[in-house]
Image (cartoon, rainbow, N blue to C red):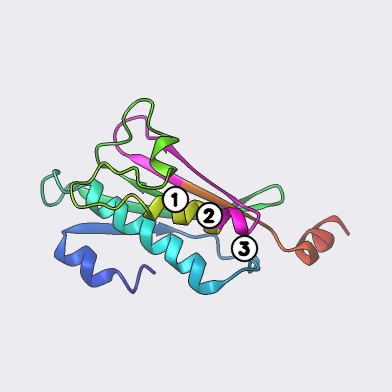
């Protein structure tokens, strides 16, 4: 998705950085649906920084592993999530955007839930927010780690 959104990032003056764990196993799931989640989270991150000056817009995408979960994170340096809205933003038709439909994050959460994962958001300590999602590591990978 980073490659697909490269031109959009350039147009918006957003620097996209990655910290991807090269040793992660492949997860089971619908590739198109999971790409839709990544696309939505990245575009939301881009939009969250519209008010920042050019040269100050950055998104960091990280992947890793914690226990039996594969984790992905999309962090921005935008305005963050208003107090009390961390769960509301995942509800259908809830939006903070003037032209938004309020369906993107709701659909993303449904996709991740259908893959037996979890999607959540946390404000960053300094500025912006990080959206995280976790997916179960493949069962055969867990067996080989234990054996």
Mark 3 is surrounded, within 10 Å at the Cα level, by few (under 14), some (14 to 19) or many (20 or more) other residues, namely some
Q: Residue 110 carries which label?
A: 2
Badge 2: residue crowd in 10 Å (few <14, some 14–19, many ≥20): some
Residue 7: name its quadrant.
bottom left
Q: Mark 3 points at which residue?
A: 24
Query: Looking at this rendering, what residue extends furthest in the top direction?
Result: 83
- Is 79 displayed left or right of 63 in the figure? left
Span shown in magenta:
112-131
Q: Distance between the residues labelled 2 and 1?
A: 6 Å
Q: Farthest residue to the left: give it.
A: 53
- In the rendered view, does 68 fall on the left or right side of 50? right
Q: How far apart are marks 3 and 1 (CA)?
A: 27 Å
Q: In which quarter of the image is residue 136?
A: bottom right
Residue 46 image offset from top left, x and y in percent: 25, 54
**Residue drawn 65% across the image and 68% down it:** 28
| Mark 1 neighbour class, 10 Å CA radius: few under 14, some 14 to 19, many 20 or more | some
Find the distance from the CA under tag 3 to the CA under tag 2: 24 Å
Q: Does the magenta stretch include residue 127?
A: yes
Label 3: element kind:
loop
3 and 2 marks in contact (CB < 8 Å): no
Q: Name the residue under label 1.
A: 106
Q: Are marks 2 and 1 in contact (CB under 8 Å)?
A: yes
């Amino acid at each position: 998705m980073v490659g697909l959104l490269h031109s959009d990032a350039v147009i918006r003056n957003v620097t996209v950085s990655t910290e991807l764990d090269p040793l992660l196993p492949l997860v089971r799931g619908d590739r198109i649906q999971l790409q839709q989640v990544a696309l939505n989270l990245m575009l939301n991150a881009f939009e969250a920084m519209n008010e920042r000056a050019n040269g100050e817009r950055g998104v960091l995408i990280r992947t890793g592993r914690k226990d039996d979960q594969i984790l992905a994170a999309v962090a921005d340096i935008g305005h963050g999530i208003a107090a009390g809205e961390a769960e509301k933003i995942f509800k259908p038709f809830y939006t903070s955007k003037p032209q938004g439909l309020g369906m993107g994050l709701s659909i993303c959460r449904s996709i991740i839930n259908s893959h037996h994962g979890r999607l959540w958001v946390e404000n960053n300590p300094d500025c912006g927010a990080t959206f995280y999602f976790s997916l179960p590591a493949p069962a055969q990978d867990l067996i080989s780690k234990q054996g």
